[in-house]
Image (cartoon, grey):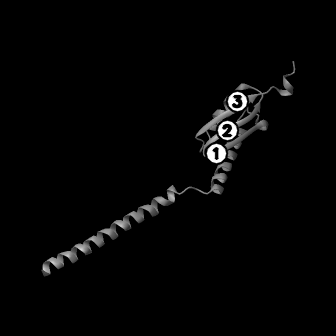
């Protein structure tokens, strides 16, 4: 009977050790992946979007042949929207290409329109 009691006690100890080891592994996994999967705060997201918008606006300003005076840039999570007007179609195309080339931009929605200077005067 003593060997049966010993085996029961040993089985209980083994069960506790296995349970503790399993808990420690799952806690470690949560701790390491929790930081990467946690949603960033709204303030952090706004800051990142603003920074990306500034980068795109700066790239457009540096590009030759684009009049940026009437172009607005909005960034949201890597998606950039260009709105406003430019004097000709070639600037719309070039602005889209420049925006796509900025690091961090995942897509570009180009909503620029052509507006002739001085109302198109015929």
Relative to 97, residue 52 above or below: below
Q: Secondary structure at mark 3?
A: helix
Determine the CA span between mark 3 and mark 2. Answer: 12 Å
Determine the image quadrant of residue 106.
top right
Residue at the image position 30 percent from the left and 72 percent from the top: 16
Residue that mark 1 sits on: 76
Q: Secondary structure at mark 2?
A: strand
In this rendering, the label closer to the viewer, 3 or 1: 1
Going from the N terminus, do you reach mark 3 or mark 2 first?
A: 2
Going from the N terminus, do you reach mark 3 or mark 1 first?
A: 1
Relative to 27, residue 101 above or below: above
Callout 1–callout 2 Cβ contact below 8 Å: yes
Q: Secondary structure at mark 1?
A: strand
Residue that mark 2 sits on: 81
Q: Residue furthest front?
A: 1
Relative to 2, residue 72 above or below: above
Residue that mark 3 sits on: 92
Going from the N terminus, do you reach mark 1 or mark 2 first?
A: 1
Residue at the image position 44 percent from the left and 62 percent from the top: 30
Q: Position of residue 87 (x, y in %)?
A: 78, 28
Relative to 25, residue 92 above or below: above
């Amino acid at each position: 009977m003593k060997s049966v009691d010993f085996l029961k006690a040993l089985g209980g100890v083994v069960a506790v050790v296995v349970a503790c080891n399993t808990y420690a592994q799952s806690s470690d996994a949560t701790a390491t992946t929790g930081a990467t999967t946690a949603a960033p705060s709204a303030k952090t997201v706004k800051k990142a979007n603003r920074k990306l918008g500034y980068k795109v606006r700066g790239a457009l300003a540096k590009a030759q042949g684009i009049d940026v005076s009437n172009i607005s840039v909005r960034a949201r999570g890597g998606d950039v929207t260009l709105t406003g007007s430019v004097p000709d179609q070639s600037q719309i195309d070039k602005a889209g290409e420049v925006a796509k080339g900025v690091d961090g931009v995942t897509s570009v929605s180009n909503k620029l329109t052509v507006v002739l200077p001085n109302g198109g005067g015929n």
